[in-house]
Image: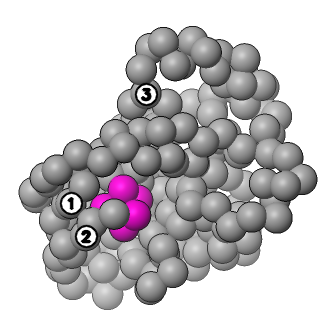
Amino acid sequence: MQRRILHYGEEPLREDSREVSEINDEIRILVKDMFETMYKSNGVGLAAPQVGVNIRLFIIDTGNQPLVFINPRILKSSGKECAEEGCLSFPGLREKVERAQRVTARATDLEGGEFEVQAEGLVARAIQHELDHLDGVLFVDRISKARRLQIRRELELLAAGESLETEEDLDQEEDQG
Ligand code: NI
């Protein structure tokens, strides 16, 4: 079942999320729903708080394989890279954000096993973006104050529940989480 994606301005996006203590049916259904919701929206990542569930869980699929991260941590990060990002909670908004170029992350998967990934580029970016969501941090928090002022109007529209997407945007696959 597809879930409603919360948009900028909705409170759960700003809350700290709690650790997942048990992987039960509720979690498995949530993950299934999140993948359905993410693919429908052409996203490459989605965090549980974005569908209004404040637990430490996110999914990504940058085209290689679907990955579920439960109680994730970044163990190591290196390098810097500035690239455009979007977020499904900010439909139509894309901004350049500086992130670590490479990360090593550890998390629990849906079967309860621990795994570690070493990622760079888009995958590393997606992991950092989604992990931020679990701490109530949004990608617009990571752009300059000056730039945030410049896009104030867009942010107000988004907070009012509007989408900034144009017809052209909707035709394109976008990397957003
Ligand atoms: Ni996002």
Element under label 2?
Answer: strand
The residue drawn where x is 80% and y is 40% is 163
Of the 4 image quadrants, the one containing the N terminus is bottom right
Crowd around label 3: few <14 · some 14–19 · many ≥20 (10 Å): some
N-terminal of the two: label 2 or label 3?
A: 2
Q: Nearer the viewer, residue 105 or 71?
A: 105
The image quarter in which residue 24 lies = bottom left
Q: Which residue was labeled with disc 1? A: 102
Report the Cα–Cα distance between label 2 and label 3. 23 Å
Report the Cα–Cα distance between label 1 and label 3. 19 Å
The residue drawn where x is 10% and y is 58% is 75
Q: Which residue was labeled with disc 2? A: 119
In percent of width and height, residue 2 lies at: 73, 69
Which amino acid type is shown beneath numbered disc 1? Answer: Arg
N-terminal of the two: label 2 or label 1?
A: 1
The answer to the question of whether label 2 and label 1 lie on touching residues, with beta carbons closer than 8 A, is yes
Q: Which residue was labeled with disc 3? A: 143
Q: Residue furthest left?
A: 76
In percent of width and height, residue 99 lies at: 30, 45
Residue 83 sits inside the magenta stretch: no
Q: Which residues are magenta?
A: 122-126
Element under label 3?
Answer: loop
